Image (cartoon, coloured by chain):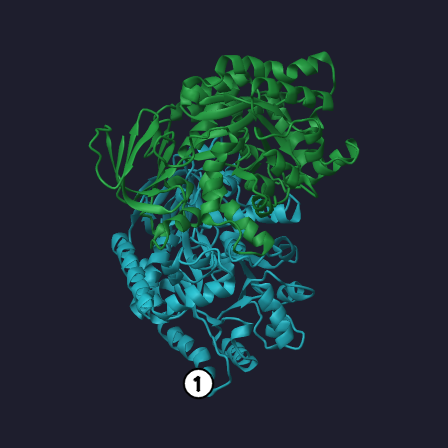
Chain colours: A green, B cyan
Amino acid sequence: MLFKNITMMNEEFVAESGKFVGIKDDRIDYIGDRMPDEDFGEHYDGKDRLLMPAFFNAHSHIPMSLLRGYGENMTLQDWLNTRIFPFENQLTGEDIYQGTLLGLAEMIRFGVVSTTDMYYHGEEMCRAILESGAKCNLSVGTVCFDDSEYCQLKSYEAAKSLFENYQDVNNGSLKIDLSIHGEYTSTPKVVAQLAEYAEESGMRIQVHVSETKEEHEGCKQRREGKTPVQYLDSLGLLGSKTTAAHCVWLEGEDSEILAQRGVSVATCPKSNLKLASGICDVPGLMAKGINVAIGTDGSASNNNLNMLEEIKFFSLIHKGHTLDPTVITPAEALRAATGNGALSQGRTDSGIIKEGYKADLIVLKTDEPYMKPLHNITNNVVYSAVGTDVCLTMSNGKVLYKDGLYLTIDIEKVLWNAEQIKDRVLAELKSL
Amino acid sequence: MLFKNITMMNEEFVAESGKFVGIKDDRIDYIGDRMPDEDFGEHYDGKDRLLMPAFFNAHSHIPMSLLRGYGENMTLQDWLNTRIFPFENQLTGEDIYQGTLLGLAEMIRFGVVSTTDMYYHGEEMCRAILESGAKCNLSVGTVCFDDSEYCQLKSYEAAKSLFENYQDVNNGSLKIDLSIHGEYTSTPKVVAQLAEYAEESGMRIQVHVSETKEEHEGCKQRREGKTPVQYLDSLGLLGSKTTAAHCVWLEGEDSEILAQRGVSVATCPKSNLKLASGICDVPGLMAKGINVAIGTDGSASNNNLNMLEEIKFFSLIHKGHTLDPTVITPAEALRAATGNGALSQGRTDSGIIKEGYKADLIVLKTDEPYMKPLHNITNNVVYSAVGTDVCLTMSNGKVLYKDGLYLTIDIEKVLWNAEQIKDRVLAELKSL
C-alpha cells in the first residue's frame, strides 16, 4: 500500500504534511516528499487524514470484555467475589476464544495492534489472536498459594507449552511471556522459580504491582516490611524484560529500583480511577527515566479498550492531580501509547514511523468539527480526538480494519456469540 | 416523528426496551409499549438504538473553539497572557459568529442541545444560535475593574438589550442570562448592582467561582477573609437562579451556603484537570443536595465539547480521587448531564423523557463491539460509549443532526471559515 500525500506523525510526534509512505510486505519501505518510483500497490488518498504509529497496549485481560458493565459501583472485594469470580468460573475454553475475538475486534477498531495480556486458556487465546492478525505478548497468570509440587509446576508448565508452540509465530506477532499475577497470590518460592525460568528461557515477565493500597500495605505486613517492588526484586523478578502493571502505591526507593532494573511500567489510568485504586505518579516515574507505557486493563474495569480515550485520561489526570499544567506533553502521551508500549513488549522495530520499521500503522480522520481549526494536530489528537476517528488499522503491513469493515474478524458472529455466552452464564449462575 | 420499537432511558435512567415514542411539534406526545393509533409522521427504526434525553451543557464559552489546541501545557497566566488574550483581541463580531457556529456544530454532533454560555459579541452569538436550532442560556461576561459609571452601565446594558430582543425567542430556545465573570474581575458595587438587576428582571445569573487556588486564596486576601462564595453571597448574587461554575476550591461553609441558596453548580472536570485547577468535591456537593450539572467549559481548555466523554471523566475521577468506588452512579452521572443541566437553565420541562416534556432527545448506536455484550445499557453508555455514538440529535422536536448530516448548519463552510479565521489571526499576531 502507498499512503499518498498524507500528514504523518514523525518520530518526535510532530506532524509533517504532504508525505508519501510506501509499505512492502510487513515493513515501512519508503518515506518521502514525492511519489516513489516503485509500485507499492493500492493507493490510499491522504486528504484530511493523519498517519500515525498504531497503539501498543501495555496491560490487558482481553476476554474480560465478556464482563463489560456486569458489576459497577462496588467495592473491589464485592466486585470480585460476587461478580467477577463467579462469572469467570462458568467460562469454557470456547467462551474465552470468543471473548478474545470480541476484545481484539474492539482493540483493532480503536487502533491497537498489539497488547500485553494476562489471562487463562492460553491455547484458545492464541487461536483467536492468530486469526485476528493482531499481535500479543500473551501470558497465563500464575496464581499459586502454596509450595506444593503441583503449584510449582503450574507456575510455568502452561507457559512452557505455549512458548514451544507459539513463540514468534505469524511473523513475530505472538510472543509468550511469563507472569506472576501478584505478590499476594503466590509464594516466594514460586516467584523465584519463575524468575529463574525467565532467565533461562529469555521470556519476558508480566506482574501486577502495588495496584491498591490494601495490596501494597498487606505486602509489607506479609513480607517483613518489604514493599511489593522490594519483595519481587529480592526474588530476582525485576529486570529489563519485566512489565509492572499499575504501580499506584509505590513509595520510598520503589521507583528508583524500577529505574535501575530497567523495568517498564504499564499505567492503567481509567481502570485505577474506576476501581478507586488511586492515581499513579506517572510524572515522577517519567522523571526517573522509566519506560512508562499505557494499558487499558480489562473491559470489566475500564470499560472499553479505547486507546485514544486512555491517552486523554493519561494526559489530563496528572495535570489536575499535581496541579502542574506542564506535566506530560502531548508528544509524551503519544509516545507512551506507541513506542514505549512496543518497547515494553520487546518489539524494538515497532512503534514509530521510520523506514525499515514494522508497518504497524493507523489512520485518523481529521476533518470533524471537533478537530478544527487545526492549530496543532498533535494537540488535537491527544486532547480533542475520539477513539472512532481511527479509520484504518494496519498490523505487519496487513489492513485489519478499514472504514467500518473488520477484515479478519466476522464481527456480527462475534457480537452475537458474546450475547449468547452472557445469557448462558447468567442463566447458569441463577440456577446455582 | 415516531421512534418505533426502541430501547428508551426512563426517568430513573433505567433502559426499557420495545418502546414507541411519538413526537408532536416540540413535545413528547406519546410513550407506550405498542404502536399508537395517531400518525406521528416519519418512523424511526429503533433496532440497536437507544433513545435518551439530550445533553444540557451547564458551562461553556462556545466561540473559543477557534482557539482549540492553540496553547497547551502552559501555566494559566502564560496561557492567558501569551495565547488566549492576544488571539481573542483580534476576533471580530463576524469571527465570533463563525466560532459560535463551529462550537454549536460540535455540540449538536455530540448530542448537546442546550448550553449555558458566557462570552462577548452577544448579538452575533444569538444569530448563530437561532440559525443552528440549538438552545442557549447566553450571557455576556461582566468584567469591571472600577466603579466608574461606564463600568456600572456596562455591567448590564448589553444584557438588557439582548434580553429585550431575544429572551425566549424561537419557542424558548434562547434565554438571556446575566453574568459576573468572577470575583477578581469586578468590584463589590458592580456585583451588587447586577444582583439587583437580576432580582428586578427575573434573569438567571452565571458566575465563575473558586476555579483556581490562586483565585480562591486571593479573594480571601482582597475581601477581608471572605471566600468567593461568602463574598458573592454577601452581595446577594447567590440564589436558585444562579449557576456557579467550577467550585473546585470550596472550603468550610461554602457548600452549605450554596445548598441553602439553591445554587446550581456547573462542574467542568476535563477543563479543571487540563488547566491543573484541581478536582471539585462533587460527591460532597451531591451529598448536600446541590443540583450538580456538567459543563464542558470552552474548547481552548477542554479541548472538545464531547459530553459523553465529559460524563466519563465526571464518573471516574471522583472514584479515583476519593478512593471510594461507590461514589457517583451511572444514573447520577447521566442525570447531571441531562435533567440537572436543564434545571440549572430554568428549563424545567426538559431533560427527561416524559409525556408533555420538550422533545430534546438523542439516539445512540449500541451495536458496536465496545458496547457488547449488553449486561446493562446504562453502565455501557456511561463507561463504554464514545461521543460519536450519537447518531441523532433533536431539539424542540426538530432533528439537528442525523447520521453524519448537519441539518441546520453548512458544516463544510463553517469548518473552512474556522481555518480562514485562524490563519488570518495568526498572521495578524505575527505582524504586531
Which residue is found at the position 38% from the left and 23% from the top?
A410
Choose between B318 and A149: the one closer to the eye: A149
Percent coordinates x, y for residue A308 in the rendering: 45, 41
Question: Residue furthest toward the left?
Answer: A37
Q: Residues within 10 Å of mark 1 (few under 14, many from 20)?
A: few
Disc 1 target residue: B150
For the N terminus of chain A, give its image quadrant. Answer: top left
Q: Please tell me whether mark 1 sits on a helix, a strand or a loop.
A: helix
Query: In which image quadrant can residue B239 be found?
Result: bottom right
| Count of marks placed on residues | 1
- Is residue A67 visible in the rendered structure shown here? yes
Choose between A39 and A102: the one closer to the eye: A39
Which residue is found at the position 39% from the left and 24% from the top?
A409
Choose between A42 and B245: the one closer to the eye: A42
Percent coordinates x, y for residue A378 in the rendering: 40, 48
- Amino acid marked by disc 1: Tyr
Residue B356 drawn above or below residue A174: below
Percent coordinates x, y for residue B179 in the rendering: 48, 71
